[in-house]
Image (cartoon, rainbow, N blue to C red):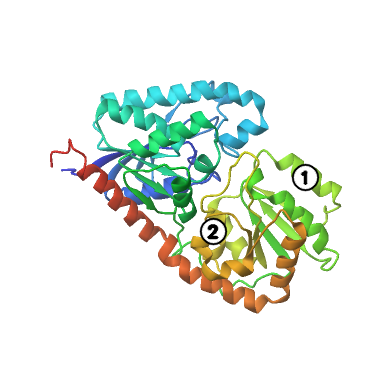
Amino acid sequence: MDHKKTLLVLASTYPRWANDHEPRFIHELCKRLTTEFNVIALVPDSEDSDPNGFLDNVQIIRYKYAPKHLQSLVNNGGIVNNLKAYWWKWLLVPSFILSQYLAVEKFLSENKIDLIHAHWLIPQGWIACILAKKFNIPFIVTSHGGDLFGLQGNTLTKLKRKVAEEANAMTVVSQAMQEYLNQIDIQPKLLQVIPMGIDLKHHFIPNSLVKREQNVLLFVGRLVPKKGLNYLLEALSILIKKQPQLCLKIVGFGPEESSLKEQVRQLNLENHVIFLGALTQDKLPKLYQKATLFVAPFVRADNGDQEGLPVALMEAIGCGCPAIVGHVAGIEDLLGDDIKQIAVNPHHPEELASAIFDALQNPTIANERAIRIRQNAINLIDWESISKKYTDILKLSINSFPNNTE
């Protein structure tokens, strides 16, 4: 007989099929939680998603929020960036929120659920907050950064406060996010810092058989403002004067793609930049293992959006790839003391160019630093320890709920 508790997960970003290039960290967590829970992920449908069914033991139910060919609010850059890039996608927001609300309500009225885990404070956290109360079940919420740092304004901040403080528990993915909650005086009942994980044991690993290329910079991430890629292109135009053989490979997709390609043309960098588009997870380790240097020039975007704890940076570190990054809140957790050498302010392309040049000139030091950071990261971000921490907080939320009869 199955004595596992049932966990309903609400998320906006989720793989549409098995090897989708969309960010898959929530699914990676869900599949690891299936050893302890029956996990059901209720997520938005999209133009070409797989039908409802199981993926890695996770039951996936997709709700429709528009005609099939228009369901594009979530993918290729995330909701906030899509709204900024395409005015017409605002028209999808009301039906997206209403359809999700109705799908969750219908599901809860027909099934026995022990706990809801909502990813992102708005809208999933808000929907969980209302319906958990209605059906008298506990819920926890995880903020990933963009929802907490972005989505500013009085009404949205009040909404975030309500969700965070009514949740049975809240998790954030970096220490900086915990400090920010203190600053804006949001006080969850129980708050823990638990980043999303990376498979550092089998997937994102160094490979001594693969020789690192020379003069290859690598960028991996969504093509959205907070990734700061436009600053890296400016830095590259400075660098090629000293290192004419330098080449930048860009892996990713998103609403900024055409303006970035235009910037490449204007800076005469066509011979130095390769856009590889979106790649699936299985193709990434080799790129990280071969690149001379991973560059992630994170910035805080104009709308306040910024990284929580960047997944691509964790993947690069896993593969032992030397890195130069933009100094945004949250990365201290990962980089420790080495942050002084590798984190810069990308708003100054000269500073970024200079840090990249130093790392290229001193490959031995850069490689030693990469291995040291990886060692620190194993306890912090390997999925094994992350999924255990989530299992503990989920069980605690169920067991301490007043209605729990066990």
Residue 380, disc:
none
| Direction from residue 132 to residue 22 in the image, left or right | right
Residue beneath the point at 43% across and 45% down? 27
The Cα atoms of the two marked residues, 2 and 1, are separated by: 28 Å
Can you tell which of label 2 and label 1 is closer to the viewer? Answer: 2
Q: Position of residue 18 (x, y in %)?
A: 47, 44
Does label 2 or label 1 sit earlier along the sequence?
1
Judge from the rendering whether residue 251 lies leftward or rightward of residue 42; answer left or right.
Answer: right
Residue found at the far bottom of this picture: 364
**Which amino acid lies under the numbered mark 2 shown in the image of this protein?**
Ile
* Residue at horizontal 54 percent and vertical 70 percent from the top: 337
Helix, strand or loop at label 2? It is loop
Q: Quadrant of residue 261?
A: top right
Residue 345 in percent (x, y) is at: 68, 58
Question: Which residue is at 40% across, 53% downward?
Answer: 193
Q: Position of residue 231 (x, y in %)?
A: 73, 52
Residue corresponding to mark 2: 331
Instruction: Tell me the quarter of the image containing the C terminus.
Output: top left
Instruction: Please indicate whether residue 227 sits to the left or right of residue 128 in the image.
Output: right
Q: Is residue 320 above or below residue 192?
A: below
Numbered tag placed on residue 261 in the rendering: 1
| Image quadrant in which you'd find residue 90 | top right
> Residue 147, percent across and down?
51, 40
- Could you tell me the amino acid type at mark 1? Lys
The residue at the far left in this view is: 406
Q: Secondary structure at mark 1?
A: helix
Which residue occupies the foreground of this view, 190 or 88?
190
